Amino acid sequence: MGWYDVVDMDQGGRILKKLESHDLEFARIGKKLEEHDRRFDAHDLKFDSIDRRFDENAKRFDGLLNLVLEHNKKIETLATKDEVKLLRQEMLSHHDQVMVILLRLDQERVFANARFERLEQKTGLT
C-alpha cells in the first residue's frame, strides 16, 4: 500500500488544487521572467550603444594623447627660462658695446666738426 492509498479523495482534491495554484504561480513567474528577459535585451541594446560611445571616446582620447605627445616633443625643443635670460644678457651686453662705440663716434664727430670750423675760420673759407 502506497502513500496515495492513505490519502483520501478530499485530501487529493486539495492537493490537486494546490498543484494547480502552483502551476499558475509558475506560469506567472515564467511571464515575469520573460518580461525581465525583454528588459535585459533592451538594457543590452543600451549597453551596446554606450560601448560604441566609449569606443568613440577612446579614439578621441588617443588622438588627444598623440597631440599632447607631439606638443611635449615641441616643448622640449623650446628654450628654457634660464636660456632665454642668458640670451637676453648676451644681447644686452652686445647692445651696450655697440652703444659705447656709437657714443665714441658721435663724440669724435662733434670734435671733428669743431676742428673743421676752426680750420675754416683760420683759412678764411667760411
Image (cartoon, rainbow, N blue to C red):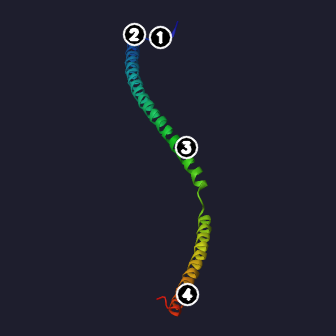
Label 1: state its secondary structure: helix
Say what amino acid the circle numbered 2 marks. Answer: Met
Q: Nearer the viewer, residue 110 or 124?
A: 124
The first of marks 2 and 3 along the sequence is: 2
State the residue position of label 4.
Answer: 111
Task: Name the residue carrying label 3.
Answer: 66
**Is the residue marked by circle 3 packed among few (<14), some (14-19), or many (20+) residues within 10 Å?**
few
Distance in Å between CA atoms under marks 4 and 2: 145 Å
Residue 6 circle label: 1
Q: Secondary structure at mark 2?
A: helix
Of the numbered discs 3 and 1, the one sitting upstream in the chain is 1
Q: Nearer the viewer, mark 3 or mark 1?
A: 3
Q: In the rendered view, tell whether residue 83 sits above or below residue 113.
A: above
Alpha carbon separation for disc pair 2 and 3: 82 Å
**Picture quadrant where residue 80 is located:** bottom right
The residue at which mark 2 appears reads as 9
